[in-house]
Structure formats: structure tokens, C-alpha cells
């Protein structure tokens, strides 16, 4: 059901309260770790043969795995790569069927919470851009080679595999390598955990740095990394990166580090009053991507999917049918903002948070009223009166717009 918030935000913690919160967060952080025991639920002894061979054949790969939490806890190659003969991506290697591409569904065998949060998110859908203007620019204006080496490395593409011969099951070079955040995988899952946790170290610290997000959130159409780097947060992060405690298991803002937030801090990670999440859009109250920016409400469905409803449009209620499923939770834009404010309050008191959001809202409203709405109306008039065609990007003014 829709979340209801009441009461003032807590901005300062007494030492006792801070200690209690720290213990609770630590317990929660431990609870979401994979269940099971090495050698029982993972750690197939047959995987040691893979390790021994790759230590000589691919020493860099071996050492990255060896230094990882996987390597230190007995997770071997076969735990992640073993396939069934019937799998479309099954490749016979040293008398064992393996797949080269490890998918989020494979990771979910141990990391269930993270998979479920990511699976319905905007990140997971990033590869579904076939009918978008982004895809038009890439495929038509750029060309397939540019799309494979550029767009799909961030958005993700559909993987294709060799279907016969000795290399049956190996990925085709045209579609692989690809670690796009919305990659379309052969087992039906979407995304790539390695977009943020690179093979074979799968580092928490890497995923928490702004550079990981900046690989894709960069450039004139999505300049988030430039905005962050020039912000006070970004400047302090660079100056105090050695104080960020990036390898912490729980990494709670205001407790495990206090110098500055990263992208992950605000959009994914934990604070004393907010749990971590792999649903990167859950705390976003505005979308600035469409020509006219709008606040957005989030509707979550029983089948794990979710969708946004722009402010002013009807919002289905919990229990309603929607998109071939049933609504199980509704987060209004105020709920989403409240979740983000829970992160802010770990380091800021209320006047800073309220002042920031008032300034932010005001500048977005100014842009909408002074530029976006009048120009959108003018573009519609040009189309309605036949001065420009309905087709996108075939007139100079559309490129300017």
C-alpha cells in the first residue's frame, strides 16, 4: 500500500540513539547476505580443476577472483558458470557444459533480494529502446557498428549465440562482450550485474564510486556525472576519497562514512532510517528526461514489474488490475522524495534539505514554464500546420529542439 509519512525528520542523533541505530543497521546488513554454507550450498569441488587451469591460462582473471569475496568464500567457477546441455548458451568445455555469460538470474541463486529489486527497475529495462528516439539516432544516424560499441554497452543488447559446430553455445562476437545494464539474456532475465560489479572481483567499492555510474550517465543528453563532479558533494568526495570506507559491508551514510555521498549513496545505499536497495529509481521524485519535466509516482506490481505515473494522471490503487498484473504498492512522488530525504538527513539538518528541494523545484518549474511548454507548443503548431513533417530529426529545428 502507499507509504504514509508523519512526524518530523530526525536530524541530530544522541550518542545512545546512534549506537542503537548502528547495531540495527549492522544486523540488517548481515541479514541480506547470501544464506548457506561453503562446500554445501556452493563450492563444488569439481570447480577446483577450473581454478587450477585458469590460474595458468588467465592469471589476471584468477587473481581477481581469488581476491574477491567469492574466492575467499569458496565460490568456484562451476557455481556460476555450470550449464545444462539443453541451454541455448551451453558450451562443452573440458567435458563439462558451461556458459560464458553469467546472468542476473544466475546470481539470484544466492543474491535473491538484489535480483528482485533490480529486476523490475528502470535499469533492467534500459535495453528495451527499440522504438525510442535514442535508438533512431543510434541505428539510423550512427549505424549498427556505433550502436554495438556505444549505445548497447550502456543500455544493453540482446545476446546471440552460435547454434552449431564445436563452438555451439558461445556468444556471437557481434553481440558480445556486453555488460549493458539492461542486457537481454538467454534465460529471460534482464540486465548485467557486471555493469557495476566488474568481473571477476565483483567489488562493492567499485559499484559505490561515481565513476562507475559516470561510464553511462555522461554527455549532453544525460550529464549526471558532470553535474556531480562540479557539485560540493563531488568536490569533497575527490578530496576525501580515502575516508569513504568503500569496502564496508554495510556502508551506512553518517555511520560508516560522512565525508560526502556518491551516486550510490543517494540512489541505492543505506542510511540510519532507510534500507539499501538495488532499485535505482525508487527515490527519484522528478523525471527530467521528457521535453516537459514532471513529478512521477511509482506503481509496483505483483509480477515484479513497475511503472511510473506522471503527476496529474490517475494512479491505480493497491489491489487494482494493471498491465496484466495486480498493484501491490504505490509510492507517490512525495513518498519517493521522503525516501531520498531519509538519506540526506544522515548528514544534513532539515533547513538544508528543505531549502535544496525548494531551489530544485523552482528551477525545474521555471524551465518548464519559460522554455519547455512554450517551445513544445510551438513545435506542435509547426507540425499541425504542415511546416514540418511528423518524422523526427528530418528538419534542422528538430535537432535544435
Image (cartoon, helix red, strand yellow):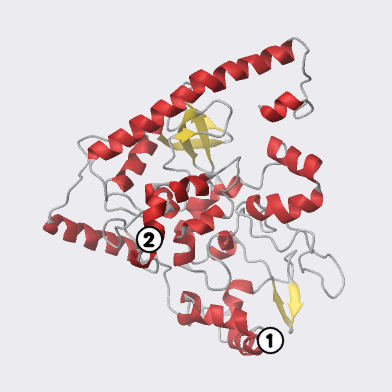
Quadrant of the rendered image containing residue 47: bottom right
- Up/down of 141 relative to 364, above or below: below
Q: Residues within 10 Å of mark 2 (few under 14, many from 20)?
A: few
In the image, taking residue 12 as reference, residue 400 lies left or right, namely right
- Up/down of 159 relative to 279, above or below: below
Q: Quadrant of the N terminus?
A: top left
Disc number lying in front (2 or 1): 2
Q: Residue at x 70, y 58 (%)?
A: 186
Could you tell me if residue 158 is visible in this image?
no
Say which mark, if any, is on residue 229: none
At mark 2, the secondary structure is helix
Along the line of sight, the residue nearer the viewer: 124 or 244:
244
Say which mark, if any, is on residue 57: 1
Mark toward the start of the polypeptide (2 vs 1): 1
Question: Extreme top residue here?
Answer: 385
Contact? badges 2 and 1 (CB < 8 Å): no
Along the line of sight, the residue nearer the viewer: 89 or 69:
69
- x, y percentage for residue 290? 58, 30
Could you tell me if residue 176 is visible in this image?
yes
Along the line of sight, the residue nearer the viewer: 357 or 28:
357
Q: Residue at x 77, y 14 (%)?
A: 387
Q: Quadrant of the C terminus?
A: top right
- x, y percentage for residue 108? 53, 62
Q: Residue at x 52, y 69 (%)?
A: 202
In the image, taking residue 25 as reference, residue 314 lies left or right, namely right
Say which mark, if any, is on residue 239: 2
Amino acid at each position: 500500500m502507499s507509504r504514509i509519512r508523519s512526524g518530523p525528520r530526525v536530524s541530530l542523533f544522541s550518542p545512545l540513539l546512534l549506537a542503537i541505530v548502528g547495531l540495527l543497521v549492522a544486523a540488517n546488513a548481515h541479514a541480506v547476505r547470501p544464506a548457506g554454507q561453503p562446500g554445501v550450498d556452493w563450492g563444488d569441488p569439481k570447480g577446483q580443476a577450473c581454478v587450477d587451469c585458469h590460474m595458468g591460462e588467465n592469471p589476471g582473471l584468477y587473481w581477481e577472483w581469488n581476491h574477491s569475496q567469492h574466492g575467499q568464500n569458496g565460490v568456484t567457477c562451476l557455481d556460476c558458470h555450470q550449464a545444462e546441455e539443453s541451454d541455448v548458451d551451453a558450451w562443452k568445455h573440458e567435458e563439462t557444459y558451461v556458459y560464458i555469460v553469467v546472468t542476473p538470474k544466475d546470481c539470484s541463486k544466492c543474491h535473491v533480494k538484489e535480483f528482485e529489486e533490480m529486476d523490475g527497475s528502470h535499469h533492467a529495462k534500459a535495453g528495451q529502446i527499440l522504438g525510442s528516439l535514442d535508438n533512431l539516432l543510434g541505428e539510423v544516424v550512427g549505424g549498427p557498428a556505433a550502436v554495438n560499441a556505444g549505445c548497447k554497452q550502456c543500455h544493453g543488447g540482446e545476446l546471440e549465440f552460435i547454434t552449431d559446430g564445436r563452438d555451439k553455445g558461445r556468444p556471437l562476437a557481434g553481440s558480445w562482450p556486453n555488460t549493458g545494464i539492461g542486457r537481454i539474456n538467454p534465460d529471460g532475465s534482464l540486465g548485467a550485474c557486471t555493469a557495476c560489479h566488474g568481473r571477476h572481483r565483483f567489488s562493492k567499492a567499485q559499484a559505490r564510486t561515481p565513476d562507475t555510474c559516470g561510464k553511462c550517465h555522461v554527455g549532453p543528453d544525460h550529464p549526471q556525472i558532470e553535474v556531480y563532479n562540479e557539485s560540493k558533494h563531488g568536490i569533497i568526495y575527490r578530496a576525501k576519497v580515502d575516508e569513504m570506507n568503500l569496502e564496508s559491508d554495510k556502508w551506512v551514510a553518517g555511520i560508516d562514512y560522512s565525508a560526502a555521498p556518491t551516486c550510490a549513496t543517494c540512489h541505492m545505499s543505506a542510511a540510519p532510517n532507510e534500507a539499501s536497495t538495488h532499485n535505482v529509481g525508487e527515490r527519484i521524485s522528478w523525471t527530467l528526461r521528457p521535453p516537459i519535466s514532471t513529478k512521477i509516482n511509482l506503481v509496483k506490481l505483483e509480477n515484479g514489474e513497475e511503472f511510473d505515473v506522471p503527476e496529474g494522471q490517475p494512479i491505480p490503487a493497491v489491489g487494482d488490475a494493471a498491465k496484466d498484473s495486480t498493484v501491490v504498492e504505490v509510492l507517490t512522488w512525495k513518498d519517493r522524495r521522503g525516501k531520498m530525504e531519509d538519506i540526506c538527513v544522515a548528514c544534513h539538518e532539515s533547513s538544508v534539505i528543505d531549502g535544496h528541494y525548494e531551489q530544485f523545484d523552482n528551477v525545474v518549474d521555471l524551465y518548464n514554464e519559460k522554455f519547455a511548454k512554450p517551445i513544445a507548443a510551438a513545435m506542435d503548431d509547426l507540425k499541425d500546420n504542415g511546416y514540418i513533417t511528423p518524422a523526427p530529426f528530418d528538419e534542422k529545428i528538430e535537432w535544435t529542439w
